[in-house]
Amino acid sequence: MAGPDLIRTVLYTINNLLQQEKYKAALAVVKGFRNGAVYGAKIRAPHALVMTFLFRSGSLKDKLRAILKATYTHSRNLACFVFTYKGLQALQQKIQGKSLQSHSFLAACVGGWLVFGDNNNINSQINMYLLSRILFALSRLAVEKGVIPAPKQDPFPLFATLVWGIVLWLFEYYPHTLQPSLQSSMNYLYHDSNVWHDISDFLVYNKPRIAGS
């Protein structure tokens, strides 16, 4: 009975600690680290799985290693960023005695520089994903604040027109400027579809099957 009693005592102590208001800021940083790690793994693992088996060559072991590496990197980076961001936010608020908008910006700047400043494939994808989101958000904010007038018509069709026109122009004539993963996707869609030898690699497979594979 000592085992169950000990577990109950430990759980009671932990739960009691978690309810203490004076520790809330520090505990929020710890949980932020946890959530960053979990969320990073959840969104990277399926993406890495699909992209690796679609476009990466090599043995099954090599592919699984690449998936695990990408998942670990994304999970670690997001966890470290959330930890840094929330920690610096709490520190600034404690020093100044109140929460300011600048706290969020400065904390995120430091975290972005420390964690996502390394120029690798994972960080590049995350940063470009965020860039597209903040451009949309800043455009909406500019309209809300009266910096620019509200459009009389929905600008989304024009946005789609320019995005697709520019990206395909870059792909066809300056593909080296695009991310490798985007190049791979576009090669599959637009260039691989120009080549076939018989019905097998016209409809069933993308490329001819190698004998013995």
Image (cartoon, rainbow, N blue to C red):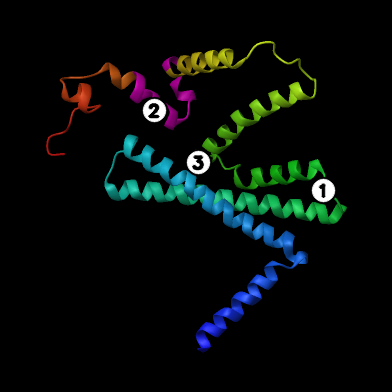
Q: Is residue 44 above or below residue 13?
A: above
Q: Earlier in the sequence, mark 1 or mark 2?
A: 1
Q: Is residue 201 above or below residue 83?
A: above
Q: Residue at x 37, y 39 (%)?
A: 50
Image coords of residue 148 (percent x, y):
76, 17
Q: Are marks 1 and 3 in contact (CB under 8 Å)?
A: no
Q: Which mark is residue 99?
A: 1
Q: Quadrant of residue 32?
A: bottom right
**How far apart in space, not on screen, are marks 1 and 2 (Cα)?**
44 Å
Q: Residue at x 33, y 19 (%)?
A: 191
**What crowding class fits label 2: few (fewer than 14 Cα within 10 Å), some (14-19), or many (20 or more)?**
some
Circle 3: residue type: Ile
Q: Which residues are magenta?
A: 172-190
Residue 181 falls within the magenta-colored stretch: yes
For label 3, the residue is: 122
Q: Which mark is residue 28?
A: none
Q: Main secondary structure of the magenta part?
A: helix
Image coords of residue 144 (percent x, y):
76, 24
Q: Quadrant of residue 7?
A: bottom right
Image coords of residue 112 (percent x, y):
65, 43
Q: Residue at x 81, y 52 (%)?
A: 93
Residue occupying the far top of the picture: 152
Circle 2: residue type: Ser
Circle 1: residue type: Ser
Q: Which mark is residue 185?
A: 2
Check disc 2 and report its element: helix, strand or loop.
Answer: helix
Q: Earlier in the sequence, mark 2 or mark 3?
A: 3
